[in-house]
Amino acid sequence: MPLIYMNKGKQIYYLHQGKTKTGKPRYHFSMKDKGILTETIPEGCELYEHPANAQVFLRTKRPQIVTDIERYLVKKYLKKLNRPHHYLFDIKGKIITIFESNQNVDDLKAMFKTFRETTYRPIMRFILEDKKRRIFVAERFCFKGSIDDWINIGRSDSLKNLLKAYLI
């Protein structure tokens, strides 16, 4: 039976296997169920769903730099926000990125009972600056036309202190 994954938008993805020009195996996810489907994720790889658009990828496993406790703290502080379902987070390496919904999810769900998908944009991130002392720096995405980039918004501190300062 092929490996099947349903993303947060309720779209089905199938894991496909192919070959590179040199004959080595190559894997990818697709919404098509035709072709050579495989049952398991290859050794050293992991499934990744992008939080902004729910696209599914197969990627090389990455070392976990952000701890489970830090992951829990981000989840906890996002839940404290007025509309916690408007926010998602993603961790890549030493960067924790907070995403905000581009649409009013509640209004869309009320209008369309079968509403399935919303998109998200990155608005804030916390970057691990000192691995030993677990010190992070906070950045906010600036949407001014002349900048459109990440800007530093404050001091370096523990993740918990930065979350308290910027997510409440």
Image (tube, rainbow, N blue to C red):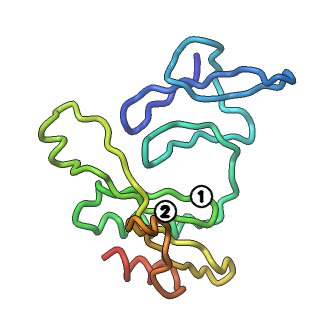
Residue located 77% across and 21% down the image: 19
Badges 1 and 2: C-beta atoms under 8 Å apart? yes
Measuring from the top left, give residue 31's x and y in whole percent.
49, 23
Give the total number of marks visible in the rendering.
2
Task: Please say if 163 is above or below 82.
Answer: below
Question: Upstream in the sequence, badge 1 or badge 2?
Answer: 1
Q: Is residue 21 left or right of residue 147?
A: right
In which quarter of the view is residue 45 placed?
Answer: top right
Query: What amino acid is labelled 2 in the image?
Result: Thr
Q: Mark 2 points at which residue?
A: 97
In which quarter of the view is residue 68 placed?
Answer: bottom right
Residue located 83% across and 25% down the image: 24
The disc placed on residue 33 is none
Task: Please say if 80 is above or below 90.
Answer: below
Measuring from the top left, give residue 115's x and y in whole percent.
23, 35
Q: In this view, does 46 lie to the left or right of 32?
A: right
Helix, strand, or loop for circle 2? Answer: strand
Q: Distance between the residues labelled 1 and 2?
A: 8 Å
Which one is in front, 44 or 126?
A: 126
Instruction: Looking at this view, name the residue that lies furthest to the front.
Output: 146
Q: Name the image quarter holding the C terminus.
A: bottom left
Residue located 54% across and 79% down the image: 137
Measuring from the top left, give residue 25's x and y in whole percent.
78, 25
Query: What amino acid is labelled 1 in the image?
Result: Lys
Task: Please say if 96 is above or below 13.
Answer: below
Helix, strand, or loop for circle 1? Answer: strand
The disc placed on residue 92 is 1
Q: Name the image quarter holding the N terminus.
A: top right
